[in-house]
Image (spheres, grey):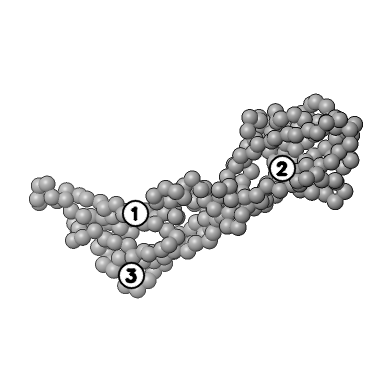
Amino acid sequence: MANYTITRHTEDDHTYGCTQFSTNQIEGQVATNNGPLDSTIVWDITADQGYSLDMEDFSFTNATFHGYTGSSNYMMVWIDLPPPILAALVEQVSSVLIRVALFLQPIANITGGSAFVMPGNDVNVTVPIEGCAKIAGHSMRLWFNEPGNGTLSKTTMTLNGDLENNLRVNTSDVEGGLKSHEIVGTLPPQALDKVSTSSGDYLMSYVVIASSGYRYKSTPTLGFNSKIYNVESFPQLTDNPYEKGKKDITGVRFEIYKK
């Protein structure tokens, strides 16, 4: 599923045909700005509920990306589209709306050519555009309490480096000299191609290590039950210094993923 819809940005003074993607024009009309044959055809790409859009994720099939333009809102420029379309500008209006303007007349400093003149016959043009919506970002807050054996264990919380601008780790003291780690922030939109993996999007690691000279009788577990997040554990095994061939459990790394 695309998880978005494409509609025509319509205007009251235009005469549309059997669909919103067609207009009724008269032979000899020339594509001009706000004229009877408008120089632009505008599409609105709107995300479905719970999804977001990024213009960088969209492209025109067999067209050429020409760069960016605009001083305040940067727009992507595409050329080499099917004639009579001379260029397209793609603008990120919001996280849920992308606006695409297809130009039927030249754009200064971008493309040459001539303005489209309506011939005596119908003109049908197919302009394929490809792109994906993403699952929208959301706020999150998680707490991790240190094991109750005090100084016999050490804990470390490490965020995914790509999320350091989105999440923050707050560490505070709790009873008995133990510490609690709070992870709070807003996750960015999530790509659909990552959702289908077994774990999801990697968020952070929580490592529990036994103090020097100690070991665990069994692998530590994380009391974590969520429909939103997955947890995978990776025990750390160390050679027993007194029994050759025996492995001691000296730690475990928990990896947390967004489903």
Q: Is residue 12 visible?
A: yes
View extreme (left): residue: 243
Q: Is residue 78 left or right of residue 249?
A: right
Q: Judging from the image, what secondary structure is the residue with disc 3 in? A: helix
Q: Judging from the image, what secondary structure is the residue with disc 1 in? A: strand
Which residue is more in the foreground, 47 or 19?
19
The numbered disc on residue 96 is none
Instruction: Identify the mark nearer the N-term, 3 or 2.
Output: 2
Q: Judging from the image, what secondary structure is the residue with disc 2 in? A: strand
Q: Is residue 108 visible?
A: no
At a point 23% along the width and 55% down the height, the residue shown is: 250
Q: Is residue 201 left or right of residue 53?
A: left
Residue 113 in percent (x, y) is at 80, 26
Image marks 3 and 1: residues in contact by CB distance under 8 Å: no
View extreme (top): residue: 113
- Residue position for label 1: 232
* Badge 2 amino acid: Val
- Residue position for label 3: 177
Image marks 3 and 2: residues in contact by CB distance under 8 Å: no
Image marks 2 and 1: residues in contact by CB distance under 8 Å: no
- Residue position for label 2: 100
Residue 232 in percent (x, y) is at 34, 54
The CA distance from mark 3 to mark 2 is 58 Å
The CA distance from mark 2 to mark 1 is 42 Å
The CA distance from mark 3 to mark 1 is 28 Å
Residue 146 in percent (x, y) is at 33, 65
Instruction: Identify the mark nearer the N-term, 3 or 1.
Output: 3
User: How would you rate the neighbour count of disc 1 (Cα within 10 Å): few for under 14, some for 14-19, many for 20 or more?
Assistant: few
